[in-house]
Image: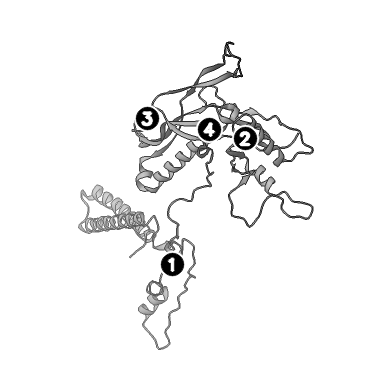
């Protein structure tokens, strides 16, 4: 089958001939009043040929469109095609075959280029999407869980206790103690975010929706962990545990304290306040620095590289999280001192009615949650810098 270039060349030649015969017919008609039968027949023949070539060209172009715009000139021909289309074969057929007749054709090397066999190579693609790293969330696991059906959680917090209990002689008025309370509010806050996607891509790539759902939920957990620890309590922010914790004041003075000493003294401070700590929060960098401490012989003082034990110090579990700032620590009685309340657990909603999404074939994928944090006993938590002053 002729190529697009060959058909176009032949069509151009026929068009020139049609033009030439048309001019001849007009000259004859002007001179004799009508064109000759021979000229008329020639014009009709050329017009039919022109129509056939135009139809052939259209067919070639349609096939190219279906193949992605590549015609026969854009691929490597087979040996048979090269022989059939060679000039040598035509000359031999026109001049007759002789005993020593031979035909030589030049064949291109087959390569991985698109103009060769490269388009026939199918990529071996891994299924799904390879997601980025995700932080392990740990702070919520330390706190007592709860739920609420309101937008505000209130609780009474002891603000003072005067203990007048004492031995009393007969007939003497008994001592009177006093206890004071203050009403505390834990506001329910909302943590939302959304992403837009076209309806076409979600239809053509169904796995993408689960990827988006997972990343949106992960984003909520990241924001939640930061709020639980260090929410400022201002505006639409949780009043975080670290924000409300008591500042570190060493109960006793020791010579040349280390990081481990500081943490032990902070545990003592909480214990003297009647709140024995149940956990320690550190940045992973600070925990690694503690584990890498060595004595003068090069042996690890604290850690055992071959141990599979969970991180712990002074009998308390150590939670290493990047939600903490480097060189800061937080110890406390987490389950006794704080509680998180879910008003609406993390949920993902898809809608087309947002803004002009409907007319733009877009979808808005929204993830949000609502929660409150009650820090019942701020003195149950001690915070400070882990590096000794």
Q: Residue at x 25, y 47 (%)?
A: 30
Q: Which disc number belongs to residue 76?
A: 1
Viewer-side label of 1, 4? 4
Q: Earlier in the sequence, mark 4 or mark 2?
A: 2
Mark 2 and mark 1 in contact (Cβ < 8 Å)? no
Of residue 96 and residue 221, the one placed in the foreground of this image is: 221
Q: Is residue 355 above or below residue 128?
A: above
Q: Earlier in the sequence, mark 4 or mark 3?
A: 4
Tell how many labels: 4
Of residue 54 and residue 162, the one placed in the foreground of this image is: 162
Q: Position of residue 63 (x, y in %)?
A: 33, 57
Q: CA distance from mark 1 to mark 2?
A: 71 Å
Viewer-side label of 1, 2? 2
Q: CA distance from mark 1 to mark 4?
A: 77 Å
Q: Residue furthest front?
A: 170
Residue at which label 2 appears: 330
Q: Residues within 10 Å of mark 4 (few under 14, many from 20)?
A: some
Q: Which disc number belongs to residue 354?
A: 3
Q: Earlier in the sequence, mark 1 or mark 2?
A: 1
Q: CA distance from mark 4 to mark 2?
A: 15 Å
Viewer-side label of 4, 2? 4
Q: Position of residue 217 (x, y in %)?
A: 45, 39
Residue at which label 4 appears: 336
For the residue labelled by badge 2, is the local secondary structure a helix, a strand or a loop? strand
Of residue 107 and residue 2, the one placed in the foreground of this image is: 107
For the residue labelled by badge 1, is the local secondary structure a helix, a strand or a loop? loop
């Amino acid at each position: 089958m002729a190529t697009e270039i060959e058909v176009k060349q032949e069509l151009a030649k026929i068009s020139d001939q049609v033009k030439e015969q048309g001019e001849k017919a007009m000259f004859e008609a002007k001179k004799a009043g009508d064109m000759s039968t021979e000229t008329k027949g020639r014009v009709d023949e050329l017009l039919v040929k022109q129509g056939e070539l135009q139809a052939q060209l259209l067919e070639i172009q349609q096939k190219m469109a279906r193949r992605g715009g590549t015609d026969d000139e854009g691929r490597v021909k087979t040996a048979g095609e090269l022989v059939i289309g060679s000039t040598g074969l035509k000359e031999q057929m026109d001049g007759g075959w002789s005993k020593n007749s031979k035909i030589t054709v030049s064949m291109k090397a087959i390569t991985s280029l698109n103009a060769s066999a490269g388009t026939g190579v199918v990529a071996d693609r891994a299924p799904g999407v390879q997601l980025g790293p995700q932080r392990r969330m740990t702070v919520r696991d330390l706190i007592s869980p709860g739920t609420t059906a309101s937008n505000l959680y209130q609780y009474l917090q002891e603000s003072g206790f005067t203990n007048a209990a004492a031995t009393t002689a007969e007939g003497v008025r008994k001592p009177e103690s006093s206890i004071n309370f203050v009403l505390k509010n834990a506001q329910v806050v909302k943590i939302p975010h959304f992403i837009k996607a076209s309806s076409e891509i979600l239809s053509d790539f169904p796995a993408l929706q689960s990827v988006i759902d997972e990343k949106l939920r992960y984003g909520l957990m990241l924001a939640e962990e930061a709020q639980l620890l260090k929410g400022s309590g201002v505006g639409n922010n949780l009043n975080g545990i670290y924000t409300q914790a008591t500042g570190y004041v060493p109960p006793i003075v020791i010579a040349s304290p280390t990081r481990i000493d500081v943490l032990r003294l902070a545990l003592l401070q909480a214990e003297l306040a009647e709140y024995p700590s149940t956990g320690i929060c550190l940045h992973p960098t600070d925990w690694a620095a503690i584990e890498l401490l060595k004595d003068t012989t090069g042996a690890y003082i604290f850690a055992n590289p071959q141990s599979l034990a969970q991180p712990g110090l002074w009998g308390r579990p150590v939670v290493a999280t990047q939600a903490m700032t480097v060189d800061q620590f937080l110890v406390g009685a987490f389950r006794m001192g704080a509680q998180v309340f879910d008003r609406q657990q993390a949920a993902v909603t898809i809608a087309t009615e947002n803004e002009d999404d409907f007319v733009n074939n877009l979808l808005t994928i929204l993830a949000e949650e609502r929660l409150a944090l009650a820090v019942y006993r701020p003195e149950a938590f001690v915070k400070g810098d882990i590096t000794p002053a």
